């Protein structure tokens, strides 16, 4: 019984992080979020999305637009935005990185943020 409890509380033991993320990193983070999951993980994903997603003001500031080929373009930024993730949110992101890695679904755009998320 104690073993099950320790596994269940694993996310509580993970320390959160606060890092600076640029536009490309934030797009990568959004791409990592699960499309389907249980209630707890979808709630965590919703909370992460709210922290990472772009506001209309940011979209104007970064001159974000869709190019004719359908890809997203923006002005390069010198500074990123500080985002703080809780231990539970970080654990979800790490499990998503592991899942994408096992499925060979890590893209070049996601790679830097995957390394950031995997850091201890």
Image (cartoon, rainbow, N blue to C red):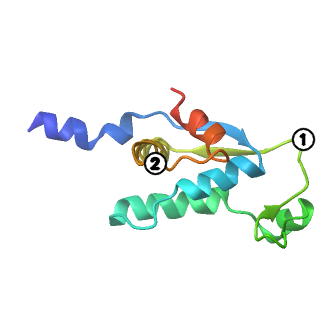
Q: Residues within 10 Å of mark 1 (few under 14, many from 20)?
A: few
Tell me residue 11's x, y (percent). 37, 41
- Which quadrant of the structure image shows residue 91? top left
- Whole-angstrom CA distance, mark 2 to mark 1, is 29 Å
Q: Name which residue lies at 74% across and 50% down.
A: 24
User: Image check: 10 left or right of 26?
Assistant: left
User: Image check: 41 left or right of 6?
Assistant: right
Tell me residue 112's x, y (percent). 65, 37
Depth check: 56 or 6 in front? 56
Q: Which mark is residue 14?
A: none
User: Image check: 117 left or right of 77?
Assistant: left
Q: Which mark is residue 100?
A: 2
Q: Which mark is residue 78?
A: 1
Q: Secondary structure at mark 2?
A: helix
Q: Tell which circle, 2 or 1, labels the residue nearer the N-terminal end.
A: 1
Q: Name which residue lies at 68% across and 37% down.
A: 19
């Amino acid at each position: 019984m104690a073993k099950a409890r320790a596994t269940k509380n694993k996310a509580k033991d993970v320390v959160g992080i606060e890092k600076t993320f640029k536009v490309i990193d934030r797009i990568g983070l959004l791409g990592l979020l699960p499309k389907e999951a249980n209630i707890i993980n979808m709630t965590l994903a919703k909370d992460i999305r709210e922290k990472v997603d772009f506001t209309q003001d940011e979209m104007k500031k970064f001159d974000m637009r869709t190019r004719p080929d359908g890809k997203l373009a923006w002005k390069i930024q010198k500074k990123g935005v500080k985002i703080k993730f809780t231990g539970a949110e970080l654990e979800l992101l790490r499990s998503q990185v592991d899942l994408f890695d096992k499925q060979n679904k890590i893209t070049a755009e996601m790679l830097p943020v995957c390394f950031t998320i995997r850091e201890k």
